[in-house]
Image: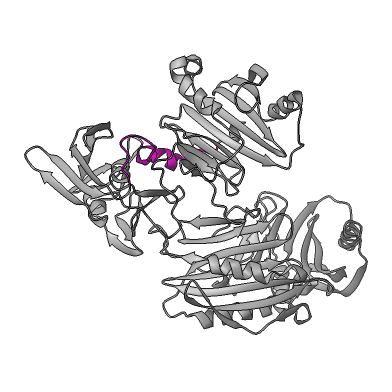
Amino acid sequence: MKAIWKLGLGSLLLWNAAVPAGAWAADSGKQVHIELILGQDVLKVNNEAITVEKPYISNGSTLVPLRVITTAFGAVLTWDSETKTVGLKSGQTSLSLQIGSTTATVNGVQETLEAAPELQNGTTMVPLRFISEKFGAKVAYDDATKQITITGSAEASSGGSSIDTDLGKTQIGNSYYGWSMKYPTGLIKDYQSFQEDFVGFEDADGEFRMSVQAETGVTENMSEDALISRLSDETEGKVLKKTFVKQGQTPYALIVTQDDDGVFEHRAYQSGDRLYILIFYVEKEEDYKNPAKYSKYQNLLDSFQVKFNSSDSTVKDLSTVKNGYRTYTDETYGYSLKLPADWEKAENQDDEILFYDPKKSKFITMTISSKADKDSLQPWVDRVAKRFEDMFVADYRKMDAQRSTTVDGNPAVALRSKTTIDKKSWSAVENVFFIKGNYKYQIHFDFEKEADLSEMLIKDTLNSLKVTQPSSSIGDLKDAADADRSQTSLVRNKAYGFHVTVPAHWKQNSSAESNMLQFGTGVGKFSVFAYEDVGVTPQEMITHLKNAIKEEDEVEIKDIESKSETIAGVNAHWNVFEAGVTTSIVCVFEKDGTIYVAHGYQPNALYTETLKKQIKAAILSIQVP
């Protein structure tokens, strides 16, 4: 159960910057007057007193809680937990600041701060004058009273990928999954999954948490007992209550559990083929039993509805889905794009971000890298095309002519290619390249079946792509595809003492303490094994390996080459054979009672002359004790 909570410390630290619905929140376009005194934890917003973290001086600059800024200007707030970057937007002005960094970005242009944003007692503190003046406000300081006065205007933000502000919102919900409830005053949205089927909230002290999880395609019209049983799958710990509640707008299954971490209240609602699971967590049992503390959250939970009123302007919609497309915004790399609503997002791999269709084998990958000083678009595209030709054997690849296009107003080049593994079925790939500022952007569309290639998907995705300035935390991003593939690395096996020299770009997939060294070649595998007292000869070991591949892959073995070779000063048996759509290069020898097996396993489509030479060189480099 605890795994369901993805705790975002950065979001929690921004608690005091949130703009909940309340009497002191500024309306768009109205003047806001704020008074605060250095060292005092009470300030006034339009003559209403609010308690905040005490403002203080750092490096000659006054730092105030981020909440003061969002209150004064009605600014839209975003947070990137990976880079600890704060995004603020008021009117047509966008700011990006990183905790601990004196570099800020203002409308895409980097500027230097006198003092970096800091975390103080769990509150984000930011430089007051810099932000206020960028947002067009006036800041006055009375040296005698140490009072600071801010006079500004709460401007509505427009354009870009910014989210709606919370001004005037009394409810929240998700239009895509069809649920709503009262606005969770006192809680901040801590995490929302890419597909929006899970959203979590937390209070400033971590004493209360709440989540809403939506699941589609479940059995319709489940009985009361079935719903309780389904909810039990989400629970663990000592069960304090298990029942079905019929009062209120929507009946629900209820299970209350307790463990060493606290008390958990689970609720399950159903509407058609949709299941909604609410989980409310209280850290201290006494708080759960305290009516004064629990009642406000009970009212919040009881307000949950399995419907969403799109015409109600008081409901804050947590969904970005519009007309069947979901908007994904990446504040770190500075871009946004629209994807089909049912697509999913994979975990980030280095500088790549992968989206995929769970129903069909369709993929979209975004890759961002730094542009070298003398690099330009066409040479970059030509290098990629050359690498593609070098990777595939000629009979297994096709490439269309390059096409010029534009992406978000930037000159771009599209490159379409097709590949096959068995010369029967073909896959299609569309790569689109463009450069903006100091960064190169590559959008990779991958269709496992050529027939599934969608011109509309490519067009809609490219038309939706918007690129802004990446976060100031982003530095040099070396293009992995431009790595020097002529370099080699010597890798040792600690357990058996043998070592091998392989291309540096091969990725080691095994522990040096095991009986083997294994590498991913980028398209296949290369392994070196050590076996003691196996009771077979090197030739018998090769036969055993062939039979294992034949049985596992259900293919026939076709011998290509068999010879003797000297490895590590002894005679070795070298054998090359095809097994279906793959080629194996095997070399086996025995020394001092230990048998060593080197095995390269590659698809025929990618078994190029270059790869052949790399595998042969790796095998010949093997040295044993």
Question: Which residue appears farthest toward the right when viewing the image?
Answer: 556
Find residue 102 and report its image quarter. bottom left
Rendered image quadrant of residue 429: bottom right
Residue farthest left in this picture: 144
Q: Does 504 sit above or below residue 129?
A: below
Front-most of residues 561 and 603 = 603
Task: Please state the extent of the stretch shown in magenta in the rendering.
Answer: 6-27
Horizontal arrangement in the rendering, residue 133 relative to residue 521 (left or right): left
What residue is drawn where x is 55% and y is 26%?
A: 302
Say which residue appears at 39% left-offset and 37% top-offset: 21
- Main SS of the magenta part reads loop
Residue 507's place in the image compared with 388, above or below, is above
373 versus 185 height, above or below: below
Q: Residue at x 79, y 81 (%)?
A: 395
Q: In which quarter of the image is the C terminus?
A: bottom right
Q: Nearer the viewer, residue 355 or 409?
A: 409
- The image shows residue 608 at horizontal and vertical percentages of 73, 77
* 573 displayed left or right of 230: right
Outermost residue to the bottom: 401
Q: Quadrant of the image for the N terminus?
A: top right
Q: Where is residue 286 in the image (x, y as percent from the top left)?
A: 48, 15
Q: In this view, does 506 lie above or below 264?
A: below
Question: Residue 278 or 562: which is nearer the viewer?
Answer: 278
Horizontal and vertical percent for residue 509?
Answer: 67, 56
Res 578 seen here: yes
Q: Answer yes or no: is residue 484 visible.
A: no
